[in-house]
């Protein structure tokens, strides 16, 4: 199949999706779809975005494909609702993002000669600043982002205008500094100070993840998944011993936990070798 046929097939499928959504929302369509608003669909939009992220992490292509479709459906639905209210339609959405991509890639579509990714990002930020009307550089930082993601995005944007630690060791030192301040706040028994300092500590740890070229949100998600898996094994081990969670003291739980950690680390090393 050549490029023209592939584009035609994509266009036909997309037009069919848009037509289906229009029909679902039209009089005589689906009662549930007709009742939806931007606000009622918002939780589903956020949930589907997270499900896409989950499919990426598990490298499940079939699920990834399905979740991208679910997310695309919601985008088309939001555009349809906006169009019904006389605001904008899906064609406007696609047109805007197309123009933005061309405008922000002058090294591809224009005369800019930047080539490496670092220079491209700085150029992107410079062009973006010229487009925005906010008073401050970080005014466009979305307030609704999850806290870890928002912190890392703020740090990344600041780094693009040279406000950044030079070396990782400086960030590590900052983490230790913030941990010391948390200890002092706890000793003072000042609840507000404890909250403030723990927030600063979390912010510093996110910065460390960013400086190590890691995504803090993904790193914490992986750590949480690992904790859940180990805790499930702990619960299974207790059941094998004829015991239940809540009826066992911490010393026994810690002993089982330490053994599970050894086993899972060994299993992880074996998995890596097989790859």
Image (tube, rainbow, N blue to C red):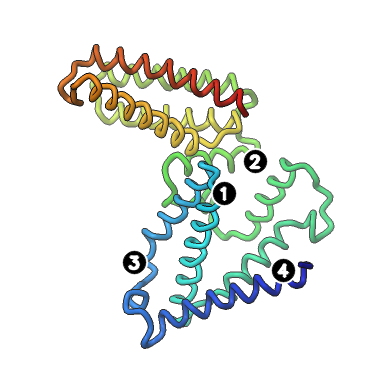
> Residue 151, percent across and down?
48, 39
Q: Which residue is mark 2?
A: 161
> Residue 171, percent across and down?
55, 24
Task: Say whether disc 2 or disc 4 marks the residue closer to the N-terminus.
Answer: 4
Q: Residues within 10 Å of mark 3 (few under 14, many from 20)?
A: few
User: How far, Cα to Cα, is label 2 from label 3?
Assistant: 38 Å
User: How far, Cα to Cα, is label 2 from label 4?
Assistant: 41 Å
Q: Mark 4 falls on what kind of element?
A: helix
Q: Comparing marks 2 and 4, which lies closer to the viewer?
A: 4
Q: Mark 2 falls on what kind of element?
A: loop
User: Is residue 249 placed above or below 150 in the rendered structure?
Assistant: above
Q: Which residue is mark 3?
A: 40
User: How far, Cα to Cα, is label 2 from label 1?
Assistant: 10 Å
Q: Quadrant of the C terminus?
A: top right
Q: Comparing marks 2 and 3, which lies closer to the viewer?
A: 3
In the picture, measured across the screen, residue 9 lies left or right of residue 263, that is right
Task: Say whether disc 4 or disc 3 marks the residue closer to the N-terminus.
Answer: 4
Q: Which residue is mark 1?
A: 137
In the picture, measured across the screen, residue 190 lies left or right of residue 5, that is left
User: How far, Cα to Cα, is label 1 from label 3?
Assistant: 32 Å
Q: Which mark is residue 80?
A: none
Q: Residues within 10 Å of mark 4 (few under 14, many from 20)?
A: few
User: Is residue 188 placed above or below 48 in the rendered structure?
Assistant: above
Q: Which residue is mark 4?
A: 6
């Amino acid at each position: 199949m050549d490029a023209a046929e592939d584009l035609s097939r994509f266009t036909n499928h997309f037009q069919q999706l848009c037509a289906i959504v229009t029909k679902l929302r039209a009089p005589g369509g689906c009662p549930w779809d007709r009742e939806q608003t931007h606000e009622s669909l918002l939780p589903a939009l956020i949930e589907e975005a997270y499900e896409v992220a989950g499919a990426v992490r598990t490298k499940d292509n079939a699920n990834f494909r399905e979740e991208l479709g679910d997310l695309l459906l919601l985008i088309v639905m939001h555009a349809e609702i906006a169009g019904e209210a006389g605001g904008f339609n899906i064609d406007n959405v696609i047109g805007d993002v197309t123009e933005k991509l061309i405008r922000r890639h002058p090294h591809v579509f224009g005369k800019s000669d930047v080539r490496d990714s670092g220079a491209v990002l700085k150029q992107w930020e410079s062009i973006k600043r010229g487009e925005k009307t906010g008073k401050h550089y970080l005014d466009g930082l979305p307030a609704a982002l999850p806290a870890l993601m928002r912190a890392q995005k703020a740090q990344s944007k600041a780094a693009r205008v040279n406000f950044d630690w030079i070396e990782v060791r400086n960030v590590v030192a900052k983490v230790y500094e913030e941990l010391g301040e948390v200890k002092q706040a706890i000793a003072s028994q000042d609840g507000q100070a404890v909250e403030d300092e723990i927030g600063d500590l979390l912010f510093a740890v996110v910065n460390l993840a960013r400086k190590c070229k890691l995504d803090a949100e993904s790193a914490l998600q992986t750590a949480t998944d690992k904790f859940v898996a180990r805790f499930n094994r702990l619960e299974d081990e207790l059941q094998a011993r004829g015991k239940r969670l809540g009826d066992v003291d911490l010393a026994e739980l810690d002993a089982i936990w330490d053994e599970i950690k050894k086993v899972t680390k060994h299993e992880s090393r074996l998995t890596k070798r097989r790859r």
